[in-house]
Image: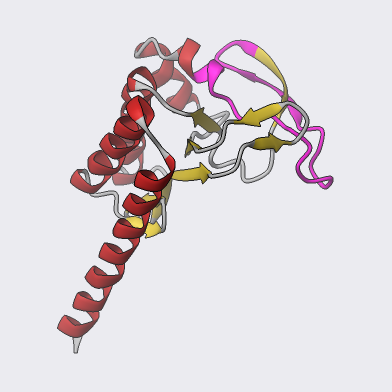
Amino acid sequence: MPEQKCTTLRQKREEKRLELLGSIDKCLTGDVKQTVLDFVEYCNENEMPMRGVGDFCFKGKGMAAVRFRYKGGRLGKSIVYEENSCYIDVVFEVGNPDYENFVISQNLSDIVWKNVKYCEGCLSTCAPGRDMTLLGKTLNKVCVYKTDKFLRFIDPNAESLRCIKKILEFRKGIISAGKC
């Protein structure tokens, strides 16, 4: 019986992987498509299976999520998503000095600041976001909805992917050490 459950779990993961790859193929082109494919391959090779379509985890803890925008349009007041675009949301523990020290030591501050998820008023319950300090810089109107995925890389490029990988490797270490 356990072998049957294991086979079913593998089948479900494969179905999710194929669905995600279909979305990537349908929605993305060029460098963004290759970056997202590289991200998915990286997650699969580094013990971060999909929990849902596009949701990656490590030892049951959330790590990142890939989302697609098939139709262009606005999210909130100012973020405009191009048609057939995507973003990768990455878990980042704001206020955790280990995360901040890691980002500083890896010279990732600028790219992290560029990819903070800001409030766009999508929900009236948490708008207008919150002001906070991150890596010594005051940020205004930061999104507080689903705050675990604090970073949003819209149409990621190779530089973004390098940053994402470093943060995910660091988070895996935190999880493995039982600090999360």
Magenta range: 112-137
Residue 145 vs 82, above or below: the answer is below
Q: Residue 114: where, in percent of width, then height?
A: 54, 17
Residue at the spot 46% in from the left edge and 29% down from the top edge: 155
Residue 167 at least partly seen: no
Residue 161 quadrant? top left
* Residue 61, above or below 34: below
Mostly what secondary structure, the magenta segment? Answer: loop
Which one is nearer the viewer's eye here, 5 or 28? 28
Q: Inspect the magenta stretch and tell me whether residue 9 lies in it.
A: no
Of the 4 image quadrants, the one containing the N terminus is bottom left
* Residue 73 in view of the camera: yes
Q: Quadrant of the C terminus?
A: top left
Which residue is located at x 53 percent, y 31 percent? 152
Q: Residue furthest left?
A: 3
Residue at the image point whose x is 37% and y is 33% from the top:
29
Q: From the top left corner, tell me how far across and down residue 36 is, in percent.
A: 34, 36
Name the side, left or right, on which 66 lies relative to 50.
right
The residue depicted at 36 percent of the width and 59 percent of the height is 19
Say whether residue 112 is left or right of residue 124. Answer: left
Left or right: 75, with 9 as reference point:
right
Residue 135, x across and y down, in percent? 55, 15
